[in-house]
């Protein structure tokens, strides 16, 4: 295109913008509006509750979406005239009957149609995860990570403290992926000793050992075309890590006592409540395996990182307790003192501990109101969430730990360890005696 053509094109009148009141375009604009699953879901949700209004925070929790997405969709619904915005602080949103008849007819026809149930709405683990979402957006960010991870077969490593919902996240990724219709095999590596690792993971042939009367398929074989979840993978021994690495590289294995190679197609999801990167540095976890399992990492926040969610989650767990025991939803309620006590606790067991604490308090309370005296914590000395952070190690403790790490990394070769620490061998010997490391040397060597 020449410069003259560009000049002529720039002088042409801009196309007329279609106004909402033009009936010719109302149908196509409404179809575009409800084409978005989030806008369609918000419209159905508000229309089903015409007498109620909702703030953005509650809608974020209900639909598991970020604030910006919910805000934009609500704005478009209001501009089209099918929702209303109540001027309050914070603003609230509700349903609205359109003033224009064509739009009202389109809305009625849309609401009469049966809503398409998405894979996300069908997944039981998604409903369970949404119960863990409060007003803090940290869990909504995790939700977006889960949606991203579910789109491919990439290996996922879920990091988070005990009781934060790592297995729930793993099941979500499985159920939202293309393997959702296949099996999900979960293994707790912390409860799996080395003597049972091969038989549990790879299975065994008949006669492989005393008591092996029949062939038994292993978890890998059962997870074929599905997902294998290794919980607390950091607790695997180095021998077990080497065997797992081989399967991840070849996707083939042999049953215990067998000679035939078995081909498997599985997706690996791992979880750990410990820092695997530090385990790699301390030679307690294989570096090559770490890169295999950590292709995509998802970190779950602890409950103390989102204290604003504690009242929301506590009320939600209390309502579940009432429903489970056949009671009205308002049969039990938390007093202000009890809620304050819950917010001040450090929650080392996170969401799992909060749910059990609320259920125990509801069971112990003689009346309808749960008092602070009815709340009993499993870790009485866990302190409050507002307590001071744990003390830092002293210089002596830090130096001792660093020398110990250098000795272990060098296989207790004192000459090499002194070179790494950039000190003389005589200084290293003196530090070993000073910190009493000689005894630890003898106790660790056989294990290495």
Image (cartoon, helix red, strand yellow):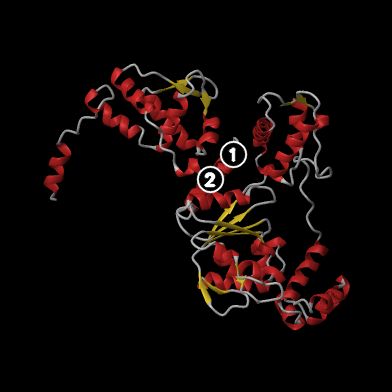
At 75% from the left and 79% from the top, the residue drawn is: 418
In the depicted view, which residue is nearer to us: 211 or 357?
A: 211
Q: Position of residue 259 (x, y in %)?
A: 56, 80
In terms of image quadrants, where is residue 414?
Answer: bottom right
Residues under numbered marks 2 and 1 in contact, where contact means CB atoms less than 8 Å apart: yes
Q: Position of residue 177 (x, y in %)?
A: 47, 52
Q: Position of residue 328 (x, y in %)?
A: 66, 24
Secondary element type, mark 2: helix
Q: Is residue 433 above or below residue 134?
A: below
In terms of image quadrants, where is residue 350?
Answer: top right
What's the CA distance linking mark 2 and mark 1? 9 Å
- Give the left or right position of residue 70, taking residue 215 as reference: left
Secondary element type, mark 1: loop
Residue at the spot of label 2:
143
Q: Position of residue 143 (x, y in %)?
A: 53, 45
Instruction: Please give the label number shown on residue 133.
Output: 1
């Amino acid at each position: 295109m020449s410069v003259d053509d560009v000049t002529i094109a720039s002088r042409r009148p801009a196309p007329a913008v279609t106004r909402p009141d033009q009936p010719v375009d109302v149908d196509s604009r409404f179809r575009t509006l409800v084409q978005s699953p989030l806008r369609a879901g918000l419209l159905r949700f508000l229309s089903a509750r015409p007498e109620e209004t909702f703030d953005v925070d509650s809608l974020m929790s209900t639909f598991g979406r970020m604030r910006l997405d919910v805000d934009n969709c609500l704005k478009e619904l209001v501009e089209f005239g099918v929702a209303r915005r109540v001027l309050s602080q914070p603003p609230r949103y509700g349903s609205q009957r359109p003033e224009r008849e064509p739009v009202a007819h389109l809305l009625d026809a849309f609401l009469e149609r049966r809503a398409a149930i998405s894979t996300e709405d069908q997944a039981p683990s998604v409903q369970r995860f949404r119960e863990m979402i409060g007003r803090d957006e940290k869990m909504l960010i995790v939700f977006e990570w889960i949606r991203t991870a579910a789109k491919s077969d990439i290996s996922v490593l879920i990091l988070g403290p005990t009781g934060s919902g790592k297995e729930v996240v793993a099941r979500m990724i499985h159920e939202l992926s293309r393997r959702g219709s296949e099996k999900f095999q979960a293994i707790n590596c912390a409860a799996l000793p080395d003597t049972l690792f091969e038989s549990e993971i790879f299975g065994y042939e008949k006669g492989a050992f005393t008591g092996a009367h029949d062939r038994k398929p292993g978890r890998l074989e059962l997870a074929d075309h599905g997902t294998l979840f290794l919980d607390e993978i950091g607790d695997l021994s180095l021998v077990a890590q080497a065997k797992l690495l081989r399967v991840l590289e070849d996707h083939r294995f042999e049953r215990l006592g067998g000679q035939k190679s078995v081909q498997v197609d599985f997706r690996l999801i791992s979880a750990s409540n410990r820092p695997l990167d530090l385990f790699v540095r301390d030679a307690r976890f294989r570096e090559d395996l770490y890169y295999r399992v950590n292709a995509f990492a998802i970190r779950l926040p602890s409950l103390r990182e989102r204290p604003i969610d504690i009242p929301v989650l506590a009320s939600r767990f209390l309502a579940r307790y009432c429903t489970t025991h056949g009671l009205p939803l308002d049969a039990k309620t938390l007093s202000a003192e009890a809620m304050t006590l819950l917010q001040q606790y450090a929650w080392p067991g996170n969401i799992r501990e909060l749910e059990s604490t609320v259920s125990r308090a509801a069971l112990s309370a003689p009346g309808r109101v749960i008092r602070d005296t009815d709340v009993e914590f499993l870790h009485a000395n866990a302190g409050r969430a507002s307590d001071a952070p744990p003390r830092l190690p002293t210089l002596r403790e830090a130096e001792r730990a660093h020398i110990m790490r250098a000795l272990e990394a060098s296989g207790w070769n004192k000459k090499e360890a002194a070179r790494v620490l950039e000190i003389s061998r005589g200084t290293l010997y003196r530090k070993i005696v000073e910190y009493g490391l000689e005894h630890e040397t003898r106790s660790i060597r056989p294990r290495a």
